[in-house]
Amino acid sequence: MVKLHSVRVYPSSEPLAREDQLAWKIAAVATDPVPIEPKVEDMIINRIIDNASVAIASVNRHSVASARAQALAHPRDGGANLFGLSNDRRFHAEWAAWANGTAVRELDYHDTFLAADYSHPGDNIPPLLAVAQQTGKNGADLMRGLATGYEIQINLVKAICLHAHKIDHIAHLGPSAAAGIGTLLGLNTETVYQSVQQALHTTVSTRQSRKGEISSWKAFAPSHAGKLAIEAVDRCMRGEGAPSPIYEGEDSVIAWILDGPKATYAVPLPEAGEPKRAILESYTKEHSAEYQSQALIDLAFRVRKKITDWEAVVSICLHTSHHTHYVIGTGANDPQKMDPHASRETLDHSIMYILAVALQDGEWHHVRSYAPERASREDTIRLWHKISTIEDSVWTERYHDPDPDKRAFGGRLEVKLSTGETITDELAVANAHPAGERPFDRSDYIGKFKTLTEGIVDPAESERFLDLVQDLANLDASGIQALNVQLDPAQVSPSTATTDGIF
């Protein structure tokens, strides 16, 4: 069983032993050599497939091409791979993590975990894979590292809310990636402890990246955290230290950025010898949109069958959780969420837009559903502007249920028609969720990969990658260094930036 650790601020006059600090306890979990359970191994493989599918689907999008152009300026013999490029081209691990992490994050289409805060724990994979490739680690090493990365990030997300203080969720990713790299490399507890603290210190940023007119930085932010985590571990391996105690200190993150000097958090972590299972509580996306919209897209597909005339819709109200209402709903008070000229990044954080298109189309596509011509359809705009959200305490309570089998991220739709009829329906979790109607299994992850890479990846290369990743536990260093989806060079576009950068 996991153990709850009480975390609070300690004034300088009340020194806290390092063994009692959260960063040390995280490091102790990272250096605990527990075996990987079969279900965890299977899920790690699923998530590597999932990451590859969404990365290849976004390989020629502007932010991804820009990040790749920067990485191309940093070649290194024996380094790490870049998604889409030949396996014989290698680059510095931190720049590979930057480019690959941006590709994974661009479409907002990989795994998620929601609790006190938000996270995409699959963001741990690019930095850990890059370090594994550069340092000659094998598949078993990579699995142990990823189990740690997921464990730490998910447990921090369960306990410490960042968004209430407008801090971006990558502040949990820096420590989790550093801890995962520590496990991967077999570092000692002291080195991981310092790395976790440095990684947190350097990855605190505001949530403006997800507010108002959302820019491409939303895709860059997690890859930046992964890059910073690699650099932090490198420094600490060379004997450097970190601000300490980073969580509990008098001028720490908790004291001045989060809940303040009187706050207490209860952070769950596995006890010594306890397997790392947190990845099993996370879930992927069937639809390319913010996770809190997944169940609502499935609900829209169901409700649309009861509506024959969209012009007869008077209003649509979504009763949902606090998070959904205030982050992607009308409670955010972002006029951009109702703007047909808004960026893709903004539209995938507008449940009003998402519901309008899902209701009308009965499908959700990672390209077509966000196309400018789709967003600007006049009948869609009319429907879109009839949609509002409201916080419902019942759905907020279900969102925070400590039992993962009861936790819900959906809502209830009320559609009022000009005939006087009201159509009401609700859905708690997405169909693809572990507790949903059609939980994702290996065949679904492979199906998602083949769908998203169709016409981009040669079928033989697709099968090579899928065969390799499904044998992850047995891969040697050369196998890990080939764990990359390669494209015909003609399929990979150069950066479309109008000017060159510094690199």
Image: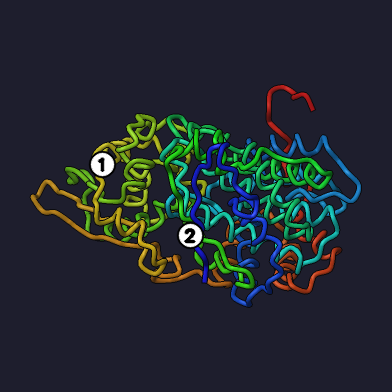
In the structure shown, which secondary structural element does the residue marked by tag 1 occupy? strand
- Can the viewer see residue 5? yes
Residue density around tag 1, few if under 14, some if 14–19, many if 20 or more, within 10 Å: some
**Picture coordinates of residue 76, whole percent (x, y):** 88, 44
Task: Write the residue at 75% across / 60% down.
Answer: 184
Q: Name the residue under label 2.
A: 286
Near-viewer residue (278 or 120): 278
Model colouring: rainbow
Q: How far apart are marks 2 and 1 (CA)?
A: 24 Å
Most extreme residue toward the top, as rendered?
499
In the structure shown, which secondary structural element does the residue marked by tag 2 occupy? loop
The reply to whether callout 2 and callout 1 are in contact (CB within 8 Å) is no
- Can the viewer see residue 170? no
What kind of residue is marked 1? Ser
Please, is residue 206 above or below residue 455 in the view? above
Task: Write the residue at 24% across / 39% down.
Answer: 386
Near-viewer residue (311 or 37): 37
Residue density around tag 2, few if under 14, some if 14–19, many if 20 or more, within 10 Å: many
Q: In which quarter of the image is residue 351?
A: top left
**Picture coordinates of residue 435, whole percent (x, y):** 41, 70
Q: Mark 1 points at which residue?
A: 388
Near-viewer residue (44 or 181): 181
Task: Write the residue at 36% across / 46% down.
Answer: 323
In this picture, residue 338 sits left or right of residue 171: left
Quarter of the image containing the C terminus?
Answer: top right
Please, is residue 308 above or below residue 469 in the view? above
